[in-house]
Amino acid sequence: MLNYFIRRLGYGVLILIGVNLFTFFLFFSVNTPDDMARLNIGGKRVTQEQIEKWKSERGYDKPLYWNAKEEGPAQLTQTILWERSVSLFALKFGRSDARNAVDIGHEITTRMGVSLRLAIPVFLLQVVASTAFALLLVFFRHSRIDFWGVVLCVLMLSISSLFYIIVGQFFFSRLLHLVPISGYAGGLDAVKFLILPIMLSLLARLGTEARLYRAMFLEEIGKDYVRTARSKGLSEAAVLFRHVLKNALIPIITSAGSYLPYVFLGSLVFESFFGIPGLGAFVIEAITGQDFAIVRSMVFLGALLYIASYVLIDVAYTWADPRVRLN
């Protein structure tokens, strides 16, 4: 187990270095610090003095990769690459490139709590609802319930999440006035702002996940151990819950685990449309404003969470199937 974690840690560091360098090179192959200064200062007439001042305030007045004016290690450390990208490995996110130059680390810490309030209920409900719905369809397989259930799944996965948002806001907020159309409040008041995006997000993912789980359960239902369980006199419900579900846990864990990074990073679409100040909305604002500092930080954090999630998935495999060994 220890060797496995050491090896995964090494792979993870290499992946993070690659993602970080690729993001940095890609951005600065398109933009220069002068372009960034003009964009953030705004206005039709931007003087060179304003550009130099903006670059100096944010550390973009230094060379990108190598500072020939310095000596020793400072030739590497006194560069934009070191100060704006290498520092991420110490989780030093710095300040944004926007006019107000907000503290990115503080924003991430503050907004992550908001995103978790939305994403954790969606994650838990999605796993439970998709599994239960798929088991129901398998229990009534080759019947009208199974047929129309599959049709419903196909319809749900064929519809864009934007459609669910627009219809949900119009019906539940405009017509029925049950919940606010957008916005957010702290404390218990957050419930009335989050209940609609939680339900719509669950509905948008239910068709895809339930159809996938149904296919996995149907594959398991035809195996020898299931026929043996039936021959012992077990009911169909007992076979499904005690045998089929248990043996299908690994693909379910894989599917659910791949969603874990979004639990922390938030939902880009739902947070933006419902005015929820989470990390998803934070990323959208940064992309719209071309704030490289925030985009760079969120890409790095996303890669870190993906690596951590797949390590957790492997550990969960050992819990689901004792035959799995991490070497």
Image (spheres, helix red, strand yellow):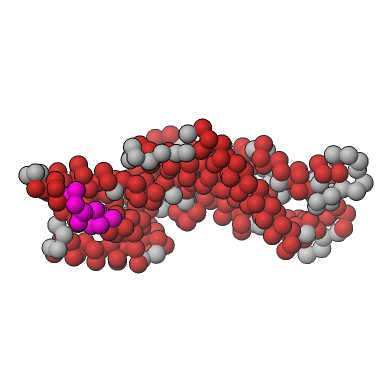
Q: Is residue 92 left or right of residue 46?
A: left
Q: Residue at x 56, y 55 (%)?
A: 284
Front in this rendered view, residue 222 or 249: 222
In the image, residue 147 above or below residue 296: below
Task: State the image coordinates of residue 177 (x, y, percent, origin top left).
Answer: 33, 52
| Magenta run includes residue 193 | no
Q: Is residue 289 left or right of residue 265?
A: right
| Magenta run includes residue 223 | yes
Task: State the image coordinates of residue 59 (x, y, percent, origin top left).
Answer: 80, 46
Task: State the image coordinates of residue 137 (x, y, percent, origin top left).
Answer: 19, 57
- Residue that extends furthest to the left in the rendered view of this protein: 233
Question: In which image quadrant can residue 88 be found?
Answer: top right
- Residue that extends furthest to the top in the rendered view of this protein: 2
Front in this rendered view, residue 5 or 193: 5
Front in this rendered view, residue 122 or 316: 316
Region in magenta? 216-226
Question: In which image quadrant can residue 125 be found?
Answer: top left
Task: State the image coordinates of residue 145 (x, y, percent, origin top left).
Answer: 15, 61
Can the viewer see residue 322? yes
Q: Residue at x 88, y 54 (%)?
A: 49
Q: Residue at x 38, y 41 (%)?
A: 324
Front in this rendered view, residue 127 or 194: 127
Q: Main secondary structure of the magenta part?
A: helix
Q: Residue at x 28, y 55 (%)?
A: 216
- What is the number of callouts on the image? 0
Q: Is residue 35 left or right of residue 252?
A: right
Can the viewer see residue 42? no
